[in-house]
Image: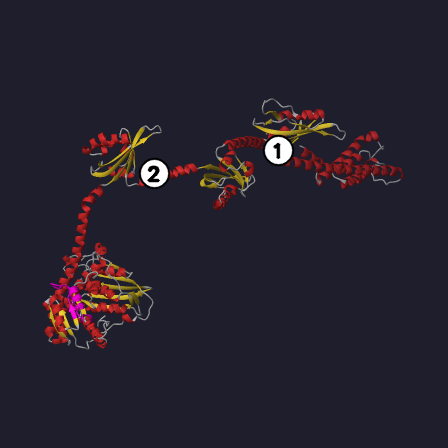
Amino acid sequence: MTSLWYALRAPGPVAGYSLSFIALAAAIALRWALDPIMGDTLPLVTLFGAVAAAIWLSGLVAAVTVTVVGYIIANYFFIEPRGALGPIDGTNLVGFLAYLLTCTLIIAFGSLLRVARAREADAREVLEVTLHSIGDAVFTTDVAGTVTYMNAAAEAATGWSKREAIGQPLETVFHIVNETTRGRVPNPVARALREGVVVGLADHTVLIRRDGTECPIDDSAAPIKDEHGGVSGCVLIFRDVTAQREIEREKQSQLLTVRRLASIVESSEIAIVGKRLDGTIETWNAAAERLFGHSADAAVGRHISLVIPPERLAEEDHIIATLKEGRRIEHFETERVRSDGRRVFVSLSVSPIKDEHGRVIGASKMARDVTRERQTEAERSRLITLIENSKDFIGIYDLDGTPIFVNHAGLDTAGLDSLEAAHRVSAWDFFFPEDLARMRDEFFPAVLQKGHAETEVRFRNFKTGAARWMAYKALTLRDEAGKPIAIGTVSQDITQRKELEDNLRKLATELSEADKRKDEFLATLAHELRGPLAPLANVLEMWKRSSSAPQMRRARETMERQLGQMVRLVDDLLDLNRITRNRLELRKTRVELATVIAHAVEAARPLIDARRQKFAVTLPKGPCELHADGARLAQVFANLLNNSSKYTDTGGQILMSARLEGDTAVVSVRDTGIGIPPEKLASVFDMFWQVDSAFERSQGGLGIGLTIVKRLVDMHGGTIEARSAGLGKGSEFIVRLPAGPPTLLASDDVERTEPAPTVSRKILVVDDNVDSAESLATLLRLSGHDALLAHDGVGAIEAAEKHRPDVVLLDIGLPQMNGYEVCRRLRDLPWGNNLVVIAVTGWGQGDEPQKWQEAGFDAHLVKPAQYAALAALLSTLSRSARENDRRSESPDTPRGLH
């Protein structure tokens, strides 16, 4: 309404001009109506009102316009001569000047009033905007207490709109009561109007909104005075203090809580310490004084390191870092130091202290002494661990024989699934009936009487019924008054001990005898197999030197192949025995892979050619050197080639390839043979394993070749893999070995040629196998030597004394006197020191080389001795013999062969 009123009093330019001319028209009409009465008197008097209206409504321009236009109209209608515009002369000059002066005064005063009105409007507008925008609710009333104004905050607070509230008594719109008594509170406006002073509300005043809801308020009323100091109205300002009241109540609650907490902290048995983030102690309760030995006065203000051992200061940094992340530390067990230097174990719980913005500003630390608990727990844990991990039967029974506790070993011994199952049986149920009377009538009464006892008794397994011998020990458990309350048992299972007592000596004897028989069997097997091989080898050598007929050549080739096969079988047996006893040693040097493969191919070629199989080998383009035992690797690849040949039909194909992959040498042997079933691939390297003989393609063998191959490859640090697509689809064996960078091969790797004997020697051959001895002697004679024979130990000594040989080829397994004793006897002869004694024997087991050396042999050869090896020894003898001849007079001259 007020805004509308001011809008009407301050119209726009068009409306102002319109209203000004309407006022002028009204003034002319009024003078026209008064003309019969007034006649020619005061013809301009009504125009002054129109000028005043124009200056007020529209401003200076409109007022001047109305003054000029109004004079012209009045001059025309009301000044003589009427009906015409007369000149301004002496008769009307005075009236004209008076009219102008009066209009000027009216316009001047009107302009001043317009300026004042504009200023008042601006001030009122500022006031209304201010009151509308402030957060406090504002009412104004007249002197009767009727609402004349309210701002938006007052509308929101009371629920009354401004339109509805203006004109209403303030008590109707502003309904207030006491929060506690609910009685009506005197309106502060009435007092402010009555006494002309500022009045504030009492505490705990509640405003009842129009919808019946309530809110606590805080208000004040002030009188509005006019320019004469009289009260013309009142202004009431109030605000909703609900949030403030909540804060006050919360603060009061917090204060009460703090007081309670302070009381709890001070009376707590747990040490509670408050500290800042820099570690400065701020609070220190009585329990902290008792725990750490420092008074509160001595501790507050000090750093928390006061109670931290030097070696644990890093823990404080970890605690502070955790607190800064806003996280709590629960039950952190550590060690702290008292004022007297004594260490105590404590359990810490540390909580962050935050300000109103959520920033961590400190910490509350609770410490509980757990030293005694730790000691008790440690002792308990050790005891529990000892009991539960013990292999002994440990149990506790009440005096009626009901098990209270049985450890895991005891449950297993008795065949019980759980402690609950043990609770359902009796101590007497553990014993066999024949032992029950003794245990119940004699043993346990003795335990109660003496406090302890022990015996040996059988326990019954509840599941199987089996008996277990136990060393049964029992003791009485008593209460503080010394009264028996239970019986504890600790029993050891001695079943095995009893069995060992009966069987150990017999078992040891049997094991020793079995091991000895096994060694003797392998050695005897080798000896018996090598015996017939020696004459065969010698005859072959004779045939090579004495016959060239085609039939003899074929016979020789056949015998040579069979001899090679028998030698390989024997060598495989011996190699397997050495490997299983970890007595096989590798003689590793730098070897060229191609050379090793060439030796393997040379060894396997006769079998491949005999079966008319297609064979191809692919070697690496460049050098590929290995740190390996060349002879053993050649044996590996030869065995793989022989294996492929045996299990591949005549006319089949065998492919061998070698390549270098990084630092690994890869050798593959692939064939088109009978293949391997998929389920058997994992077993091909097992001892004595062969492909099913039902296929009738196997060429025999002991089934140990691949086993030896696998062990030898492993000993070289390599791997071997068997592949096959199935039966009838061939097989492939892939060997991977570590390879090294190419280097010049050592001189030991250069192939040596067989030296030919240059000096004829007198050689005594001693062997109980007549064929072997005679064939070897014949072979030696064909080579230009003088060969003598003996077939037992005594005959060997007699022949040596009679003929004074240069060399003795001496078998070990001789009748009457073995080769070791013969060698020692020969060395005892006056000239025996210069005699060369070589062992030629089928015994090649274990520590035999050491025995040969200790007996005085110069060297040894294993039957069937390769003639090339024998010739090399005799050649060495020839070179050394010349030195012996030059130094024969010296007693320290060494023997001719080393």
Asked if the magenta segment contains residue 672, the reply would be: no
Residue 174 at x, y = what percent? 62, 27
Question: Looking at the image, is mark 2 or mark 1 earlier in the sequence?
Answer: 1
Q: Secondary structure at mark 2?
A: helix
The N terminus lies in quadrant: top right
Q: Secondary structure at mark 1?
A: helix
Q: Gap between marks 2 and 1, in whole Å?
A: 76 Å
Furthest-right residue in this view: 90
Which quarter of the figure has residue 411? Answer: top left
Residue 741 at x, y = what percent? 34, 67
The residue located at (85%, 40%) in the rendering is 86
Q: Using the image as rendered, state which of residue 836 and residue 56 is in the foreground.
A: 836
Which quarter of the figure has residue 486? Answer: top left
Q: State left or right for residue 419 relative to residue 536.
A: right
Seen in the picture, residue 652 relative to 182 is either above or below; the reply is: below
Tell me whether the residue at label 2 lies in contact with that at label 1, contact meaning CB atoms closer than 8 angstroms. no
Query: Which one is closest to the eye, mark 2 or mark 1?
Result: 2
Q: Amino acid at mark 1?
A: Ala
Residue 125 at x, y = what percent? 68, 37
Q: Which residues are magenta?
A: 808-833
Work out whether residue 425 can be spotted. Answer: no
The residue tagged 1 is 153
Q: Amino acid at mark 2?
A: Ile
Q: Which mark is residue 273?
A: none
The residue tagged 2 is 384
Seen in the picture, residue 737 relative to 451 is either above or below; the reply is: below
Residue 154 at x, y = what percent? 62, 31
Work out whether residue 829 can be spotted. Answer: yes
Q: State left or right for residue 210 relative to residue 342.
A: right
How crowded is the residue under tag 1: few (<14 C-alpha within 10 Å), some, or many (20+)?
many
